[in-house]
Image: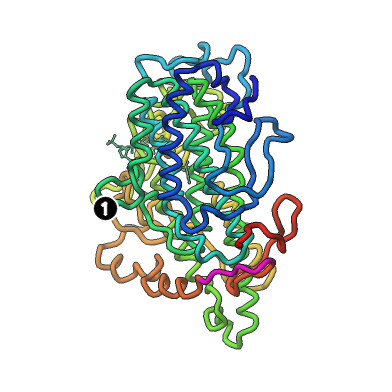
């Protein structure tokens, strides 16, 4: 694959050899730039930011770090190297050559998957567009922008597929990706969590911990795709995605670290009295963002998921770990609600694949929460963060519209209403956290409610990550 780094659209897909496609993408580029100026980080479009830019897919040297203004960021199209004689790894076409063009019979389904994936990327930038105004340090400000520009690149990754493989309707979908708006009731983003406002930095860290982690698992499932260009582009997106989850997990860890410190300073161990965020509030934020992110895996019993798998378009997380790649053997025992009681139902595996992916996600979230708990244990603080039961506060799937406690016990609507504010951020929690959101813009300084961190790419925390005049 040849690298075209100096073109208007950097790429490793030989764009210069396909003038029609190049023209179509160059036509989309100014629309994308207008969207970025309108909906990207507000107030920082002319600021120099220390950013990582993808310049190849080589594991050793794929990124370049430098100060750039975000509108000048080199959003490129990069797919991992093709594999010789690649085969479809699962589903009804298992073992046949991977598709290099869209299989006609699956065109609609494939377009839908690509559009859904693509839609989340600009949505998250929109959700985060005001956060720069209250960043707790220049380091955090830079990380926010890093995440934002890379979500922009991930949009490019999906738009490339739409333009290259789906003709006119692909181009129309690419336009529509710039027209929907997060949280706008008339033209909302497709998936629920991407219409939730991200009002403060604790929400941002929870989002990058839990919602970006949905991204990880969805991208892994798409990286198995029999449609090879989708597999190769999502594989490379995962390289960037790792940093986003790092921002979330370490962000929350730094809040916990600071809370512990502030509790020690206070005679009542009251973190709020010292201007920090108390542990129960952090738990409530966790409950919210974990549950809205769990919804992103779709319904527990899903014929869509079965079709995606059967057609070879969307696989399982690390498909190679399984021996039955047809997914025809086996059943998935699942809890379902029947007349207000939880009973076990045997679901054919293919119909339970959203739940199989959610299982892997939950295990991964738990590992992160365990690392947060280690901070508390080391400080001898008798508090433990827990993930709520998967049925808690769900808006999608078989548990939507029902009420469950944090432990997953069915409860009546009145009990839910009475306990809601103990389980999810209450209006007063949100208002309190909002009072802490003041920007800290001096080099090396950090807000009172969060600990400092190591720096980026060998630089110290005290570095001009963002040059504010
Ligand atoms: N909100 O069979 P069902 C990321 C709809 S994140 C609203 O249960 P299915 C990122 C569904 O469309 C990863 N609607 O679900 C992270 C269907 O509608 P129709 C994004 C929802 O289809 C941070 C109906 O409910 N990538 O990258 O098996 C920052 C019943 O569908 C929701 C992907 O999601 C929801 N949460 O699964 C930036 C991968 N869930 O048919 C980026 C591509 C379901 O009745 N997407 N519905 O009109 C998919 O594979 C699937 O669409 C889903 C849903 C897993 C999302």
Which quadrant of the rendered structure holds the C terminus?
A: bottom right
Question: Can residue 19 be seen in this snapshot?
Answer: yes
Q: Is residue 463 magenta?
A: no
Label 1 residue SS = loop
Residue found 53% across the figure and 32% down from its top: 234
**Whether residue 418 is situated above or below residue 321 in the rendered picture:** below
Q: Which residue is mark 1?
A: 401
In this picture, is 368 found above or below 240?
Answer: below
Q: Position of residue 164 (x, y in %)?
A: 45, 21
Residue name at image x 39 percent, y 47 percent: 295
Taking depth in this image into account, of 402 and 314 the one nearest to the observer is 314
Q: Which residues are magenta?
A: 438-443
| Residue 329 pos. (x, y %) | 45, 24
Q: Is residue 251 left or right of residue 309?
A: right
Colouring rule applied to residues: rainbow
Question: Can you tell which quarter of the image residue 374 is in?
Answer: bottom right
- Ligand 1 lies in quarter: top left
């Amino acid at each position: 694959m040849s690298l075209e780094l100096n073109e208007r659209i950097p790429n490793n897909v030989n764009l210069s050899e396909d003038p029609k496609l190049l023209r179509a993408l160059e036509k989309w580029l100014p629309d994308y730039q207008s969207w970025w100026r309108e909906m990207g980080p507000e107030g920082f479009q002319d600021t120099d930011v220390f950013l990582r830019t993808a310049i190849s897919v080589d594991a050793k040297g794929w990124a370049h770090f430098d100060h750039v203004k975000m509108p000048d960021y080199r959003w490129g199209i990069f797919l991992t190297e093709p594999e010789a004689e690649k085969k479809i790894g699962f589903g009804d076409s298992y073992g046949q050559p991977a598709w290099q063009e869209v299989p006609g019979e699956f065109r609609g389904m494939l377009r839908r998957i690509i559009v859904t994936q693509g839609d989340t990327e600009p949505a998250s930038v929109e959700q985060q567009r005001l956060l720069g105004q209250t960043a707790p340090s220049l380091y955090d400000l830079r990380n926010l922008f890093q995440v934002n520009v890379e979500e922009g690149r991930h949009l490019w990754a999906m738009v490339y597929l739409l333009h290259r493989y789906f003709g006119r309707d692909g181009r129309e979908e690419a336009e529509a990706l710039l027209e929907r708006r997060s949280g706008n009731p008339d033209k909302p983003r497709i998936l629920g969590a991407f219409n939730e406002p991200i009002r403060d930095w604790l929400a941002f860290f929870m989002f990058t911990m839990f919602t970006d982690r949905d991204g990880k698992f969805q991208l892994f499932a798409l990286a198995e795709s029999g449609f090879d260009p989708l597999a190769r582009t999502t594989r490379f997106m995962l390289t960037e995605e790792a940093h986003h989850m790092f921002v979330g997990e370490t962000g929350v860890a730094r809040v916990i670290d600071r809370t512990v410190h502030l509790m020690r300073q206070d005679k009542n161990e009251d973190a709020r009295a010292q201007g920090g965020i108390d542990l129960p509030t952090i738990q409530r934020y966790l409950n919210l963002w974990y549950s809205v992110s769990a919804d992103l895996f779709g319904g527990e019993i899903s014929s869509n998921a079965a079709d995606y798998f059967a057609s070879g378009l969307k696989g399982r997380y690390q498909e190679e770990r399984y021996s039955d790649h047809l997914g025809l053997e086996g059943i998935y025992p699942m809890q379902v609600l029947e007349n207000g009681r939880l009973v076990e139902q045997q679901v054919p595996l293919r119909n339970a694949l959203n739940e199989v992916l959610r299982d892997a996600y939950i295990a991964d979230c738990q590992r992160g929460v365990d690392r947060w708990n280690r901070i508390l244990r080391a400080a001898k603080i008798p508090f433990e963060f827990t993930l709520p039961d998967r049925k808690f506060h769900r808006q999608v799937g078989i548990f939507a519209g029902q009420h469950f406690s944090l432990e997953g016990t069915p409860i009546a609507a009145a009990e839910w209403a009475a306990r809601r504010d103990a389980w999810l951020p209450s209006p007063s929690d949100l208002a309190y956290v909002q009072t802490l959101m003041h920007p800290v813009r001096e080099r090396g300084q950090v807000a009172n409610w969060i600990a400092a961190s190591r720096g980026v790419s060998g630089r110290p925390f005290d570095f001009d990550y963002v040059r504010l005049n």
